Image (cartoon, rainbow, N blue to C red):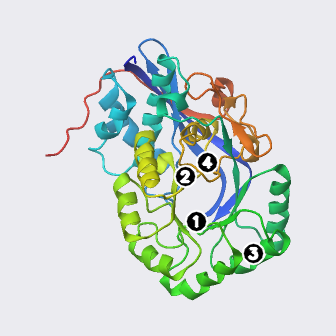
Amino acid sequence: MKSITIKEVVLHTINVSLKAPFTTSFGTIHTKDVCVVEVIDESGISGWGETVTSDEPYYNEETTHTAIYILKDFLIPRIIKKEITHPKEIYSMFSFVRRNQIAKAALETAMWDVYAKKNGKPLYAVLGGEKKKIAVGKSIGIQETPDHLVDKVGQYIDEGFQKIKVKIAPGADLDYISAIRESYPNIPLMADANSAYTLDHVDHLKELDKYQLMMIEQPLAHDDIIDHAILQKALRTPICLDESIHSYDDARKAIKLGSCQIINIKIGRVGGLQEAIRIHNLCKDHNIPVWCGGMLETGIGRAHNLHMTTLENFTLPGDTAPSSHYWEEDIVKPEITMNNGYIQVPDGLGIGFKIHKGKIDKVSIQTERIDSEKSPHPIPH
């Protein structure tokens, strides 16, 4: 396999608009800034990644603009003009920076894209995946009323989605789930709490057991694995961990403690594709099914999700809905589409989608080129 050497990195900061507001326990999103990371190999091949950050540090400590700072001042200087034999090296190269996983993933995924293209392969082939199509789930934000939510669920079931995830929070949970089950008693249904509850809600959360949910995602604190183990013992409903899992070691500890029965793997949250693969393999060895969560990505991030989900232990439908469900205009072509509840994994080189630079220019805030070996910050000893 051919190695890669990056001669230039271009940071395209853009602002994209959602088709409709998306509400979770964190708040409501109408638009978001995204940093699209373009890495250019010495042979002229471009690879693409993106920061799957929010504009506020609510999901984790990062925002789009802090991610740009980390990229420019710490991460890009470590890889510019360096020969990389394989992109799996990059995760350890970035280990001197604590956390800031989304910034790391934005650059690391772009490097995987370049590497696959330079070696004449689709990304899934270099990741070790084999599936040709991916089952698609739909995530629905908190709605004004249970009736509104049921209407949304019906719409997406009719469109063919194979799993429905609904956001919940205290005051917007049991009545909403009950209303769905009255209308759709047998659909694959899960609830996502985004850390909105505490152990004081154990009896309340036990009420969810009667609705036969696939899982409840991240009910307790974003950095917890101990209280989740206590809660899982009290519930029949499987707990899925999301925000608590930032690394292989986090997953290993959670599995050992019995904190969950399912893990949601997000490339951005764990620092890139290499760590995502390690967590996937660990979960496979422990019979813990995994699925791919969404972070309101553009088509670039969504394409990376599709390729990762070709790995065999991704056995549950992910949050990989087509572009048209979220964005007024996506920045990849063709746009990502779904057929009968599945998205076909592209066989083209790398992520398999072309980047619509005209649309990037249309929503551009700022473009910065980094093409010199700026002295990186010293690593403390």
Q: Earlier in the sequence, mark 3 or mark 4?
A: 4
Give residue 176's mark.
3
Helix, strand or loop status at disc 1: loop
Task: Please give the residue where the numbered disc 1 appears in the rendered image.
Answer: 26
Q: Earlier in the sequence, mark 1 or mark 2?
A: 1
Left or right, 231 with respect to 178, comes to: left
Give the number of the mark in front: 3 or 1: 3
Three-letter residue code for mark 1: Phe
Measure the alpha-carbon separation of dots 4 and 1. 14 Å
Give residue 32's mark.
4
Measure the alpha-carbon separation of dots 4 and 2. 6 Å
Helix, strand or loop status at disc 2: loop
Point out residue 89 in the picture as x, y percentages from the top left corner. 33, 33
The residue positioned 44% from the left and 43% from the top of the image is 277
Three-letter residue code for mark 4: Lys
Badge 2 local density, few (<14 within 10 Å), some, or many (20+)?
Answer: many
Give the number of the mark in front: 4 or 1: 1
- Asked if one can make out residue 324 in the rendered structure from this viewpoint, the answer is yes
Measure the alpha-carbon separation of dots 3 and 4. 28 Å
> In this picture, is 31 found above or below 310?
below
Three-letter residue code for mark 2: Ser
The residue positioned 44% from the left and 11% from the top of the image is 43
Point out residue 284 in the picture as x, y percentages from the top left corner. 46, 52
**Cβ atoms at labels 4 and 2 below 8 Å apart:** yes
Measure the alpha-carbon separation of dots 3 and 2. 26 Å
